[in-house]
Amino acid sequence: MGSLDVDQSSWKRVAWMLAGVDRRHTAVEHGGECLSMVEGEVHYYEFVLAEKNFTKLCNTTRMLVVNGSIPGPVIRVHKGDTVYVNVHNQGYYGVTIHWHGVKQPRNPWSDDPEYVTQCPIEPGSNFTYEVIFSTEEGTLWWHAHSDWTRAYVHGAIVILPAIGTTYPFSKPDDEDIIILGSLYSGNLKAEYDYDLIYGADLPHSIGYTINGEPGDLCPCSKETTYRRVVDHGKTYLLRLVNSIVAADMFFAIAEHNLTIVGMDANYIKPITTSYIMISPGQAMDILLIANQTLGHYYIAARQFWSLGLEVTNFDQVNVTAIIEYRGNYTIPLSPSFPSTLPAYKDLLAAIKFSNLFRSLASKDHPVNVPLNITTRMNISGVYTTNFPDQPLNYYNFIADELPITLANTDLGSKVKVLNYNEAVEVVFQDRHMTWGMAAVFIVKNGGTAETSIRKPPPHLPPCNVPLESGVQNNDGPDGKENQTIFIEMD
Ligand SMILES: [Cu+2]
């Protein structure tokens, strides 16, 4: 992948060694019930955030990246491990890092969009995140969580089965990480900031990447296409992550079936398919059996876009990488392209695929759906019927320039407070794109040390950014990423 992996050392927890207990599975007695606590190894990483010039699609652009590469370093752990990541911000604005899909029990201090439980790591300073893995197993990813910095600040998280356990399928011979990314022209942050303030259309990507490269079919990209050599007869575990800021992607490999065995670090009932659709933020574990004629085959992805109007050619680019079989054969002039990759607007293909997913729900990987709901958050409270009949402000609705006062919308700051261990059912009726709703919960301590929030870490970044500016809620284009942003109004 070309990324710099700087896992410096890996130590067992001293406390467990001293106590002489099984360091992996320990039962903690708590109020009559037995909580199974998984303890693993500790790993250390150094992330250096800095801007660097990259030449992609014939243009050179400055991008904020980690350790000089796109994608950034891979974090590789076993289930139940703990990782300390020291993030040094050598960029020009504050940034936080988010550990996407890691549950981080009792540890909200190391997991957020900026200004929720932590302020951004200011330029010239550093902060050490503590990332606690618990039940996750499979593939996740980390990314910056400050506006759209995640476009280039991201990387994979590989969570192997705990030592002494194995996959719920035959152990693959080898594995590979495939990260889908997006490219933008110009200064993405400046453009995004402008669009948010003035209500303009958000930035459009100019292309997509596989492991940082747009591939053969894009201009100025043929030399750097990502290539993976495979041996005939072997099975590979592909860890596919969609790090694209704002696009659902179809994905396929020419003449090869794909078997999806996991999603977002949970195992699922295996799905064998000739194509995949993956949403922004999603990660999938996929088995690829190299069982075709020796040759070269394209891995390809293209955007799924179901709206009819306002389609530009921007996002219709096919991003590719190449599977190359090892051996003696005549190399074809061009690899074969997957005929199964659905067309740009194939809504049916998208729906059909999305309906295939079922949890594995086996003895070793149970799904504990709460059956006793203690709090229901439903139609009332989320959706009220007093939507105004009249616009709050009148202005020339068809003018080219929108008035600046449009940014002065009414802001809500309501939060739901829950008791520890409540089972909550939430019905989201609608969601919005980047300007949208954010959902916040405050969960009270449970009354014991093991059920209470951990102490904040030392040296939490200070909140130097003045708060006199307006505050606006914001979730990601996929509706999954909730964050709070601050906009200067003067
Ligand atoms: Cu995320």
Image: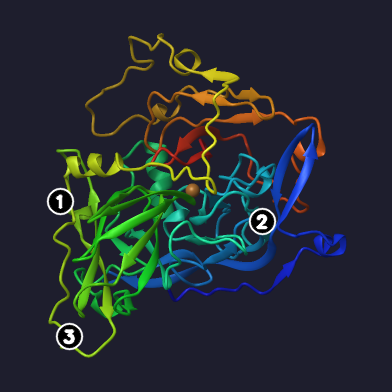
How far apart marks 1 and 3 lie (CA) works out to 28 Å
Q: Residue at x 75, y 60 (%)?
A: 23
| Dots 1, 3 in contact, CB < 8 A | no
Label 1 sits on a secondary structure element that is loop
Q: Which residue is mark 1?
A: 343
How far apart marks 3 and 2 lie (CA) works out to 47 Å
Left or right side of 202 for 372: right
- Residue 433: where, in percent of width, then height? 37, 36
Farthest residue, direction right: 18
The disc at residue 331 is 3
Does the beta carbon of the residue at mark 3 sit less than 8 Å from ligand 1?
no
Q: Nearer the viewer, residue 129 or 365?
A: 365
Q: Is residue 40 above or below residue 249?
A: below
Q: Which residue is mark 2?
A: 129
Type of amino acid at the residue the image marks with label 2 = Tyr
User: Within 10 Å of the Cα at label 1, are there few (<14), some (14-19), or many (20+) other Cα atoms?
Assistant: some
Q: Is residue 220 above or below residue 113?
A: below
Which mark is nearer the camera, 3 or 2? 3
Label 2 or label 1, whichever comes before in sequence order: 2
Q: Is residue 376 above or below residue 345?
A: above
Q: Which quarter of the image is occupied by the N terminus?
A: bottom left
Does the beta carbon of the residue at mark 2 sit less than 8 Å from ligand 1?
no
Type of amino acid at the residue the image marks with label 1 = Ala
Q: Residue at x 65, y 49 (%)?
A: 110
Is residue 452 shown to the viewer in this render?
Answer: no
Label 2 sits on a secondary structure element that is strand
Label 3 or label 2, whichever comes before in sequence order: 2
Label 1 or label 3, whichever comes before in sequence order: 3
Left or right side of 119 for 188: left
- Residue 230: where, in percent of width, then height? 32, 78
In the rendered image, which quarter is residue 208 located in? bottom left
